Image (cartoon, helix red, strand yellow):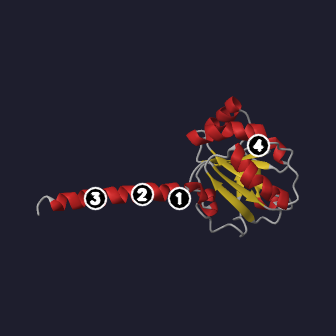
Amino acid sequence: MKLYVPLAIFLALVGLFGFGLWWNSTHIPTLVPSPLIGKPAPDWKLPLLYHPRQSLDKAQMLGRPYILNVFASWCFACADEHPVLMAYGRDLDVPLIGYDYKDKRGDALAWLAKHGDPYTQVVADESGRTAINFGVYGAPETYLIDARGIILWKHIGPLTPHVIREDLLPRLLKLGVHPKVTT
């Protein structure tokens, strides 16, 4: 009887481990649903990274769809995503707004100077307070917001050519945008 208890515990742990592997393989973390999809983006007004005395806000972006890309100089996955943004960002035919998240201004400026700047504008949220309203989990994250200010899509994790081709481009086409992207 004493041998069966450790064996039962061992088998239970193996079962839990197997369930965890199955769960992670079938529930992709980049598909975490956002309660904001289909709802207005939160009001936001943030300083421009390059010109901190100037700002950009939601009202200024109304009237045209745009992509909001959350990044930071400290984010390792952002370094993986950045070459994709450099390759495709200007050809998406919508403003690509960089959202520098919980970053020191100097660090973000140095990072963009080193890696290139694919963005139409870059806003800075050094405290991360505005990001809370968007439901930002971390960086990188990307949002597609329509001309009325409605969040249509959220992607958690790095953008890849596959994600751009399969997820983002069809949504842009539905908005009447004609990207020059060939993936």
The answer for how far apart the CA atoms under marks 4 and 3 are is: 52 Å
Look at label 3 and name its amino acid: Leu
Mark 3 lies on residue: 11
Give the position of the N terminus as an image quadrant: bottom left
Q: Judge depth for marks 2 and 3 and give the one in front.
A: 3
Q: Using the image, tell me which numbered label, if any, was put on residue 20.
A: 2
Callout 2 amino acid: Gly
Task: Give the quarter of the image for residue 134.
Answer: bottom right
User: Residue tagged by mark 4?
Assistant: 119
Do we see residue 28 in this rendering? yes
Contact, CB < 8 Å: mark 4 with mark 2?
no
Q: Earlier in the sequence, mark 2 or mark 3?
A: 3
Q: Nearer the viewer, mark 1 or mark 4?
A: 1
Q: Residue at point 46% right, 57% down? A: 22
Q: Residue at x 49, y 55 (%)?
A: 24
CA neighbours of label 4 inside 10 A, class few (<14), some (14 to 19), many (20+):
many
> In which image quadrant can residue 73 be found?
top right
Q: Is residue 150 above or below residue 168?
A: below
Which comes before the other along the chain, label 4 or label 2? 2
First in sequence: mark 4 vs mark 3? 3
Q: Which residue is mark 1?
A: 26
Front residue of this view, candidates 118 and 101: 118
Q: Quadrant of the C terminus?
A: top right
